[in-house]
Amino acid sequence: MSPSTHVPRGPAPSHPVVAIGCGLIAIALLLVLPALAATDPAIGPVPGPGQAGWWTVAVVVLLQALVVSRVGRRPTTALPVLAALPLVAAWAAPGAAFSPTVVAELAGVFLAVVARPPRRRLRGALAVTALLLAAGQFLNEVLGSGADPATASASALLQAVAVIGLPLLFGLVIAAQRDTHDARRQEVHALRREQDALLQAAVSRQRVSMSRELHDIAAHHMSGIALMAAAMERQIDSDPGTAKDSARRIRAQSSAVLDDLRRLVGLLREEPDAARPVETVEAVAALVETRRAAGAEIDLVAPAPDPGAGVGPLAHLVAYRMVQESLANAAAHAPGARCAVEIGEVRERRLTITVRNGVPTGPDPGPGGGFGLVGMAERAQLVGGDLAHGATADGGWEVRLTLPVEDTISTTRAAAPLPEDTA
């Protein structure tokens, strides 16, 4: 009956079948009562068919049946009307002939409660209906049997309580069951919407992860290919042998791009045999050698023999990606500049890795629009590290990554997967 749980699905229903049933039952009682009164004098005088009192009660119960058909749409208005019409019957034909008017009142109260109008309005309508029912019963008792006011009042009160209370109780039970059903349906809909939202969020995270992975692959390999192609263009005429060697390196870099793309597709398909290269702090040396082979001038400073000792596995991946991205950015935005990769010693349980490039000798193509620095900063935050970047005093650029020696995310950040791992 609560309005908060009711979800309207169109116009309120009418109840023509119930109305017809109420009218037929009431007319049948009117036809039977004269015969019963003839055999049982205790019932009292009852007007027979064709008499004015009988027709008056018949019109009243038929009007009540018409009102019952509209209770579902206007419950708070229909209930008082149902209780007011019997006042005419009590005045015109007091006695047992008044009884059939109760049929429509019982049905009307039940339908009004099941219709679940606003609770305050329903309470007011029920209170008015109870007063009108009591007034009709009081008038019928006084005029029909000549009862004293006290007895008539007690009878009227009991009649009102019974006619209102019984259908109200059953109606509340039905309405509560329907409210429970609606609440469960809405809960199911809410859970489905939540699942859809979680799915969309997961898809969005996967898209970001794939875009970053593709960015890392393209930035690392394609910048090297572009650098070697530029060098090969100058070597074709002056040094054909070196140019052929550069062509072979371009082919090797292109094959590496294809291998990385196949690995990424394999991970997306969840193939168990999709091999993934080991990307650790120790692998930075091989990364630097690959860039040197592409023609870049890079200095590597690293403690021996294990520069990544004590660093967690996810932090290893973050460090490798940071160096890879920084070198790719240097090749793209500082062409011809000498670079330096420095893996510092562990101090206060923190490992610092710095990638620095000098002043470029070629024109800067302008700022990029990818995920480079943003992706590096987010990865550093995932493992409890810090990333700082900015211009140096000599006009170059520096990226500095600080990582915790212990894998701090193993217990506190396990719910936040690294983007590359989900890719």
Image (cartoon, rainbow, N blue to C red):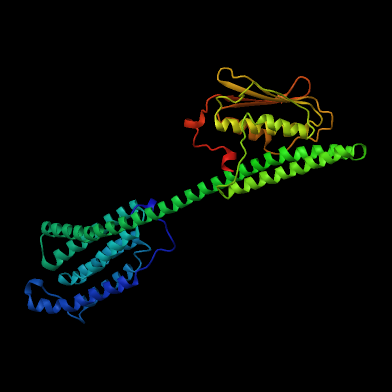
- Spot occupied by residue 98 in the image (x, y as percentages of width and height): 19, 69
- Spot occupied by residue 50 in the image (x, y as percentages of width and height): 21, 82
Determine which quarter of the picture holds residue 167. Answer: bottom left
Identity of the residue furthest to the right in this view: 237
- Spot occupied by residue 378 in the image (x, y as percentages of width and height): 60, 33
Give me the residue at 51% from left, 46% from top.
Answer: 198
Q: Could one spot residue 282 in this view of the protein?
A: yes
Q: Is residue 142 above or below residue 61?
A: above
Determine which quarter of the picture holds residue 294. Answer: top right
- Quarter of the N terminus within the rendering: bottom left
Answer with left or right where residue 311 lies relative to residue 185: right
Total marks in image: 0
Determine which quarter of the picture holds residue 131. Answer: bottom left
Answer with left or right where residue 271 lies relative to residue 90: right
Identity of the residue furthest to the bottom in this view: 50
Answer with left or right where residue 274 lies relative to residue 89: right
